[in-house]
Amino acid sequence: MLERARFAPSPTGPLHIGGLRTALFNFLVAKKSGGSFILRIEDTDAKRTVKGAEKHIIDSLKWLGLDFDEGPVRQSSRGNLYKKSVSILIEKGLAYYAFDTPNDLEKAREQSGGNFKYNFTTRMEMSNSLTLTNDETESRIQRGGYSVRMVVPEKRTIKVVDQVRGGLSFNSEELEDKIIMKSDGMPTYHLANVVDDHDMKITSVIRGEEWLSSLPSHVLLYEHFGWTPPKFYHLPLILKSSGAGKLSKRDADEQGHPVFAVKWEESAGFKEAGFTSEGLVNYLALLGWNNSSDKEKYTLFELIDEFNDSGINKSGARFDYKKALWINHLHIKDFSAEKVLALSEKAATQLGEKYSSEITEEIIDLIKERLNTALDIDKELAVFTGQPKEYDSGVIEKINREIIFDVLNFCKLSEELISNPKALKEQLMSFGSEKGISFGNIMKSLRLSLVGNLSGPDLFKIIEIIGPEETLHRIESLTNKI
């Protein structure tokens, strides 16, 4: 069967990674079958709509490569469909007008000791079209300010199926006659999502587990309309790194990592933090889904091929930023040199000015294993684009200035060896043996002069690439400093 799955966010703020994962799983279910992925914007609450939020949602999906086949469809433009649907339920006696004021409802809650539910046990005591005469009802409708509630049947067990948790049963006494049309004439989520999913021929609904408690009401609405419901999947929460509670922006800020895909106002996203879209998609797929092997690295196409809904977890998934960095690293190290350079305009310009395309590619291959994010590129390439701006003073003191001075002087006096890194390495080993200087300290001294610290790619490849003149210049600079 060709699946039709939708991602239906509300534009009430930026798109959190929890929403991104929901979008991804909907995309994977749809594309696994060769079906369609649809974007629907649930913007019926104008008061809560945030300027720029819809653009942020679309920009996030596009950056991740989650291209939608249809949409964005905006609920705010579908009002006539919702009103027609409500009229059908009222005519069937499966929905009714409710005229209760906020004060009426508050009073009912107080009298019940906080246990009030608006359902078959209380509806006949309230102000609605079931307790008023037809004339009174019509008069109240004319005055406006009413809502519409669905009818929940009396004393019934409502059985539903969640594809993640299996079959579930709910007692109708636990449910409310939920409002399906608000006093402003706009539908609530409960009505709109059911009507839209049916109208759009959605076959699978994947959403957060916070909607699991609403599932029996939604299944009842499908029943009221005489429609067949889609398959439902309720995803577990993405938890903070400690595992205690849902991951929020505040938690992410405290832990020092983003929570959005792309920048939102002053908050950098994963893109600005140097993540690749491939790396983030890969990591999100592993949050709450178990593959059938120990494989960690997936392209989006591989995920489409291997994704199976039976692997969706029931329990929450702890967000692990170090694991996210590792997954991102796995992708970057397999990128072509051209694709790595595309992540840094500065690096592409600087290398292009100094080296041929062949040498540039060799340099990129040298540093790829050291990259976790795109932000590491400029730092790792610095050794090839200019001499160190500063030196690690702790290393100088630890090795001993006199030893460093001896090693660097030997290199300066062996100028012809600088053009032959392999021979230089052999002579340095002999020099160390004669002077009683460990080869480790020799290498550290030379690396310090070329890089400024003790990290970086193969030392003799650096010498080979930057050339003898630049190598001697850097050796001279550190010699003068110490």
Image: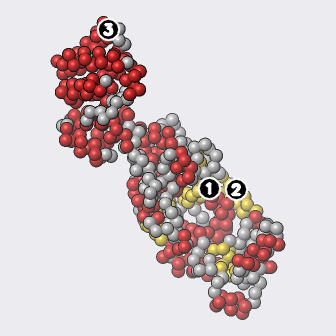
Can you see residue 473? yes
Looking at the figure, which quarter contains the C terminus?
top left
Q: Position of residue 347 (x, y in %)?
A: 28, 42
In this figure, which residue is indicated by the disc labeled 3?
435
Left or right: 72 in relation to 469: right
Q: Which mark is residue 209?
A: 1
Sequence order check: which comes first, mark 1 or mark 2? 2
Q: Amino acid at mark 2?
A: Leu
Q: Amino acid at mark 3?
A: Lys
Q: Position of residue 168 (x, y in %)?
A: 70, 56
Query: Is the residue 414 above or below the residue 268 in the image?
Result: above
Q: Toward the viewer: 413 or 419?
A: 413
Q: Position of residue 251 (x, y in %)?
A: 56, 49
Cα–Cα span, label 1 and label 3: 69 Å
- Residue 134: which quarter of the image? bottom right
> What residue lies at 41% left-to-right and 53% top-to-bottom?
64
Q: Toward the viewer: 55 or 429?
A: 429
Q: Residues within 10 Å of mark 2 (few under 14, many from 20)?
A: few
> What residue lies at 75% left-to-right and 78% top-to-bottom?
104
Sequence order check: which comes first, mark 1 or mark 3? 1
> What residue lies at 18% left-to-right and 27% top-to-bottom?
469
Sequence order check: which comes first, mark 3 or mark 2? 2
As drawn, the residue found furthest toward the top would be 434
Q: Mark 1 against mark 2, which lies toward the viewer? A: 1
Q: Amino acid at mark 1?
A: Glu
> What residue lies at 75% left-to-right and 89% top-to-bottom?
133
Cα–Cα span, label 1 and label 2: 14 Å
Query: Is the residue 332 above or below the residue 144 in the image?
Result: above
Q: Which mark is residue 168?
A: 2
Q: Residues within 10 Å of mark 1 (few under 14, many from 20)?
A: some
Left or right: 385 in relation to 55: left
